[in-house]
Image (tube, grey):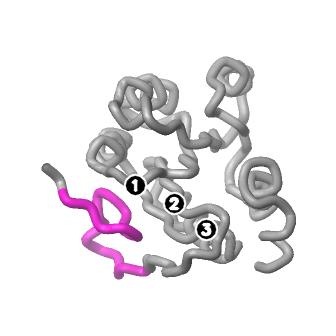
Amino acid sequence: MQSFRTGEVYPPNPFSRNMSSTIVSTDKPIHRVVLVDDDSTDNFLHKRVLEKSGLVEEVIAFEQPEMALDYLASIEHPIDVICLDINMPKMNGFEFLEAYQKLEIAKKQLPLVVILSTSVTAESIACKQGISSVVAAETKPLRRETVEQLVIEYFNGASSIAQS
């Protein structure tokens, strides 16, 4: 079984320094976010937005959806949000969602899913309407306002934002 460390990008880039860090706190409204995007630059930017928001405790990024599924299948602690790219080689975001829903953990807990794409298509909107866990379909890059809106609608509301 693959061993995963929080705060890492999978697969790791051997040419980059480990710039990721795990934020250790328990007072943040969103505990764990998984990023699934084949573009390392997007993962870096989205991770930074999430960390700088002060609203997320831990961010785990994957460049390969298959590795994200392996991770999700191996964990016991819940994931609050999955930020998911739609256009990825080998397995696109919709295929990822289908595979995720077949995992044992999905029967226990469905995290909120935010679809991130270079263009929000009619297909993305249809997916948002057809899968209850898909709560947003946004164009890249992820914005702090989107994170704040998630907190207002699904977590501890505006009081958490005022504290960050």
Q: Nearer the viewer, mark 2 or mark 1?
A: 1
Q: Nearer the viewer, mark 1 or mark 3?
A: 1
Q: Residues within 10 Å of mark 1 (few under 14, many from 20)?
A: few
Question: Which residue is denoted by mark 2 in the rendering?
Answer: 32
Q: Secondary structure at mark 3?
A: strand
Q: Earlier in the sequence, mark 1 or mark 3?
A: 3
Q: Name the amino acid, label 2.
A: Arg
Relative to 31, does residue 117 appear above or below in the rendering? Answer: above
Judging depth in this view, the residue of 103 and 121 nearest the camera is: 103
Residue depicted at x 54% and y 47%: 82
Judging depth in this view, the residue of 43 and 96 nearest the camera is: 96
In the image, the segment drawn in magenta is 3-19
Question: Which residue is denoted by mark 3 in the rendering?
Answer: 56
Q: Name the amino acid, label 1.
A: His
Q: Name the amino acid, label 3.
A: Val
Residue depicted at x 73% and y 43%: 138
- State if disc 1 and disc 2 touch (CB < 8 Å): yes
Across and down, in percent, residue 47 comes to: 55, 66
Marks 3 and 2, Cα distance to the nearest angstrom? 7 Å
Q: Is residue 152 left or right of residue 84?
A: right
Residue depicted at x 49% and y 38%: 109
Question: Which residue is denoted by mark 1 in the rendering?
Answer: 77
Q: Secondary structure at mark 2?
A: strand
Residue depicted at x 44% and y 26%: 101
Relative to 76, does residue 31 appear above or below in the rendering? Answer: below
13 magenta-colored = yes
Across and down, in percent, residue 74 comes to: 27, 47
Judging depth in this view, the residue of 96 and 109 nearest the camera is: 109
Which is the main secondary structure of the residues drawn in magenta? Answer: loop
Q: Is residue 16 left or right of residue 37?
A: left
Number of dots carrying numbers: 3
